[in-house]
Image (spheres, rainbow, N blue to C red):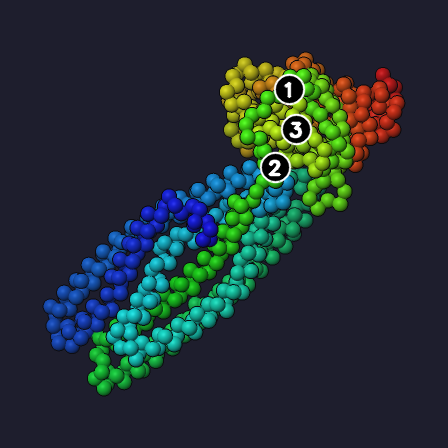
Amino acid sequence: MLELLRRYLGPYRAKAAFGMLAKVVEVVFELLVPVIVASMVDVGVARHDGRAIALRGGLLVVLALVGFCFTTVCQKMAALVSQGMGTDLREASFAKAVGLSAVDVDRLGPASLVTRITSDVNQVQLAIALGIRQLIRWPFLGVGSIVAALLIDWRLGLVFLVCTPVIALVFWAVLSRCVPYFRSMQEKLDHISLLVREALGGARVMRAFRREDHERGRFRVAAASQAADAIASGRLSSLLNPTTLLVMDLGVVVILWLGGVRVDSGALTQGKVIAFVNYMTQTLLSIVYIANLVVVFTRGAASAQRLVEVLDCEPSVVDLASGPVEPLADAPALELEGVSFAYPGAAVPALDGVTLTLARGGSLGVIGGTGSGKSTLVSLVPRLYDAASGSVRVLGHDVREYPSGQLRSHVGLVPQKAALVSGTVRSNLLWRKGDAGDEELWSALATAQAEDFVRDKEGGLDAVVEAGGRNFSGGQLQRLTIARALVGEPELVVLDDSASALDLATDARLRAALARDLSQSARVIVSQRVSSVRGCDQILVLDHGRPAGLGTHEELVGGCPLYREICLSQLSEREVLA
C-alpha cells in the first residue's frame, strides 16, 4: 500500500492533507465535549444555574455544527483523492496489462488481470478513502481521550494503560491469521472470474452439449471455496469487536467503581467522573473502529500487493531499437533461420529448427496437424513472442531491431480467433492506420469479401459493432478482421487460419482477391485446408513443431508423406494430382 501511495499520491497530496487537517479540527472539538459536559454538571446542575447550562449547551451546538462542516470538507477531500488515485491506478494497470507480451499475459492470466484492475483497485480505493476520513480521527481521538483522562486523574487513567496492550494483543492474534485468507480470497475470485468468462463466452457450446449442470457445479465449487475463506476470515475478524468491547467495558466498570470511591472521598467531582466515562467510551469506540480499519487496510494491502505485481511486471518482449529502422529494399519479406520456441513450463518445444525464406509479393502456406506449431510460428513474426533461438527477419532486419510500432506497421496480422471491439465498423478498421480514408477502407473490405454485407448494414462504415462483434456471424467477423489487417497495404500479411468459417467459394474468392490486390505484399496463409494453401508459392508442413517439408504442392505430394496424407484426407487422389 505504501508503495502505491508513494507512486500515485503526489497530485492529491494537498487534498489529502487538507482533508486530514479538517478531521483533526473535528476531533479537537469532539475532545472538548466531555469537558464542557463536566462543567455543565459541576457548575450548572450542582448550583442550579440555568444560565450556565444554557451557555454550555449553546457551545455544544456550535461545536457540533462547526464539526459537521469540517467533516463534510474531509469527506469531499477523501472522495476526490480516493477516486482520483483509483482512476490513475486503474489506467496505469490497464496500460501495463495491454503492454505486456503474450507470455506475460499467459503467466498472470487474463481473468486475474481483470480482477486486479477492477476488484483490487476498488479495495485500494476504499482503504484510501477510509484512511483520510478515519485513520486520523480514531487514533487521534483515542490517544486524545487517554491524555485528557490522565489530566483529569492519573490514577484512574492507569486503567486505560492496562486495557491498551491487552487490546493490541487481540489485534495481533486475529489479524496475523486473517491476512492469508484475504490473499486467498482474491486469488479464488480470479478463478471465479475465469469460470464466468468461460461460461458466458461459450454459452452456445455449453447448451449444445447440455453441460449447464456441469458448469453450475464447477461454479458452485469455486464459489463455495471462496466463501469458505471469506467466512473463515469473517469469523476471525468478528472476534475483534466483542473482545475489545469486553475489555473496554470491564475498564468502564473499574472506572465507575474507583471513581465512585474518589467522589465519595471528595477527591473528584461527579462531572469529572462523567467526563472520564465519556473519554473511556470515546476510547472504546476508537479502538472498535480502528479494528475495522485494520481489517480494511489489511485487505487493501493484499490487493495493493497484487497491483504492484502487475505494475512492476517487466514485459518479456521489449523494444531494443532506439529509433525507426529503414527496411532493406532488396531483402526478402520474411526470413526464418533455425527458429525454435518453447512455452514456459513446456516439456518439448513448440517450434524446433524452422528455416525458410519468403520473397516480397510471394505466398507461403503453412499446414500441419493440431498442435503442430502453426499459430506459434506466425506469432513470432509480429513479435508477440520472441524466438528462443534462431532469427526472424522482416524486410531484411531481425524483428528485435524494429520498434514494435514500426514492425507491426509492416505486418498485418489476422489472428486465429476473430475479434472486434465495441464501436463501429470504421473504428475497428482504423486500428492499423488511423488516418485511412473511406476509399481505402472500402478497398480493404472489397478484398476481404466483406463489402457487400457492410453496405447492407444500416450506416455502412458507421454500422454499430457490439462487444466482441457478436452482432456479426462467424464468417463476417473473420472477413472484417481480415479487412482490418489489409488497411494500409502492409508489406507482409499473416492470416492465421482466418478463413475457417468461410465456405469454399468465398475462401476461393478471398484468396484470388488477395493475390490480385496485394500483389506487392507477401502473404503467409495458415490453414487446415489443403485448398487454401495449395496455390501458394511454397508450403511449409509442420509436424510437432519441426518442419516435415517445404516446397510447392507438387513437390510435397511426391516427397512429403505427411503432406500427401493430409491431402488424401481431404481430397481424392485425382484432385490431389490435378
Q: Is residue 575 visible?
A: no
Circle nearer the viewer, 3 or 2: 3
Image x and y of residue 244, in percent:
42, 71
Say above or below: 415 vs 65: above
Residue, disc 1? 328
Residue, disc 2? 317
Indicate which disc residue 398 carries. 3
Say above or below: 214 vs 256: above
Query: Observer-nearest residue: 61 or 98?
Result: 98
Indicate which disc residue 555 carries. none
Q: CA distance from mark 1 to mark 3?
A: 11 Å
Residue at image position (32%, 70%) is 146
User: Disc 3 marks which amino acid?
Assistant: Asp
Left or right: where 302 falls relative to 476:
left
- Within the image, what quadrant is residue 41 found in? bottom left
* Disc 1 and disc 3 in contact, CB within 8 angstroms: no
Label 2 crowd bin: few (<14), some (14–19), many (20+), radius 10 Å:
some
User: Disc 1 marks which amino acid?
Assistant: Leu
User: Disc 2 marks which amino acid?
Assistant: Val
Image x and y of residue 247, in percent:
41, 74
Left or right: where 400 falls relative to 173:
right
Residue at image position (64%, 27%) is 413
In this rendering, the count of numbered labels is 3
Circle nearer the viewer, 1 or 2: 1
Say above or below: 112 vs 253: above
